[in-house]
Every structure is written in C-alpha cells, then in structure tokens.
Image (tube, grey):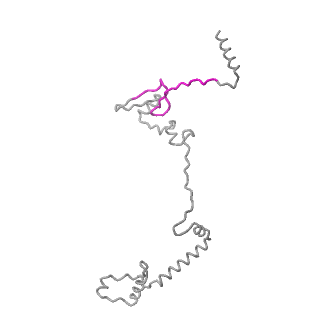
Amino acid sequence: QRRNSFRSHLAQDSAAGPWTTTPPRSVMVIKCSDCAFTEFRVYPGRGRRYIQKDGKSFFFGNSKAENLFHLGRKAAKLRWTPIWRRMHKKGGADVAKKTRTRRAQKFQKAIVGMSLEEIRQRKAKKPELRQKAAAEKEQKEKAKKGAACALSWLPPLPKSHLAAGVQQSSSRQVCREAQGSAPEGEGCC
C-alpha cells in the first residue's frame, strides 16, 4: 500500500509538469562553535571545553588541538592551521580582494597673478626657450648685483672699531658705500 501511495505521489508531480517548482525543504540550522586553537568548525556533540583557573574558557575540536595548546605551541607556526594560511596568504577563498584606491584627478586652477591661458602658454613653451629665459634671468641678476665686490672675502669690521674712529682702507670704504646703495640683503660685504 505504501508503494502505491508513493507512486501516485510521483504521478501527481509529473502531471504538474517540469516547470513547477517544489517548495524548498526547511534547512536545519546547526549551531557550531570554533576551535580555540585551530579555528576549525566544531559541530555539536564534538570537542571539549577547557576552563583555566582565571576563568578563561577554551573550546577544542579534538585532542590534537587540545594537547598542542597545553604544550604551548603557536597555531600560527603550524602549516595546517587556517591562521598560518592567512598569515602566508595561501588560498584564494581566505584572502580578501584588494580594494582599489582612488587617485586624485589633476586639474588646472588659475593662480592669483596669472590666468589659466597664461599658465597653458608657459607650459606649451619649448624647454629650450625656457632654459634660455632662465639663463638670461641669471645674467640680469648678476649684473644687478654689480661687479661682485673683490673684497667680499674680508670679514666686516666690528662696530666697536667704527665707533672708536679706526679708519678703513679706501677700497673697503668704496665697498661699504656700494653696500649702502644696494637693496637690503644684497650687499657685497
């Protein structure tokens, strides 16, 4: 009788057609815990719990893990543990994909003294022209300083000597006068 009822059940399913879906079976949820040493999943009814004197509790999946823990072995040094595999980047499933960092996009802004067009024109100049312009600028600065003082190697006289009335040599006097006429910070002596 059971056989017949089963066959009739199959006949009803096939009569409905292959396009119908059967309701999903309810999946039983099992509460698993992790081994404190190996991090492997431990199913109910397996493993042992160890509680230290200070109250810390550890759950071990098997006697091997428990004995290694009590011997003071480090799980990270054993090649068969997931901790070691994580540390040494083994296995594609354990390693998370690297996130791409966004690079800042460069864009031009106008500077206070210059407009965008002027900046673009300067960038468009050939490097040879820029070098020539830089060389000319250096020559102008040298000419601006005047003939560099021949006595620039001499140290300046202390103020006490000047106050006491010690006379300076005529060449030094000329140099001091040139220094007075030069803008601040650009004296020869």
Who is closer to the viewer here, 79 or 44?
44
Indicate the position of residue 28 as horizontal and vertical percent values: 54, 24
Residue that appears at 52% across and 77% down = 138
**Residue 104 falls within the magenta-colored stretch:** no
The residue positioned farthest toward the left in the image shown: 164
Give the magenta-colored segment's residue range: 22-50
The secondary structure that most of the magenta stretch takes on is: loop
Q: In this view of the protein, which residue sits in the foreground, 16 or 124?
A: 16
Q: Position of residue 183 (x, y in %)?
A: 43, 80
- Residue that extends furthest to the top in the rendered view of this protein: 1
Tell me where residue 16 sits by quadrant.
top right
* Vertical position of residue 107 compared to residue 146: above or below: above
**Residue 155 percent location from the top left of the image:** 37, 81
Question: What residue is at 53 percent from the left and 66 percent from the top?
Answer: 111
Q: In this view, does 47 lie above or below 159?
A: above
The N terminus is located in which quarter?
A: top right
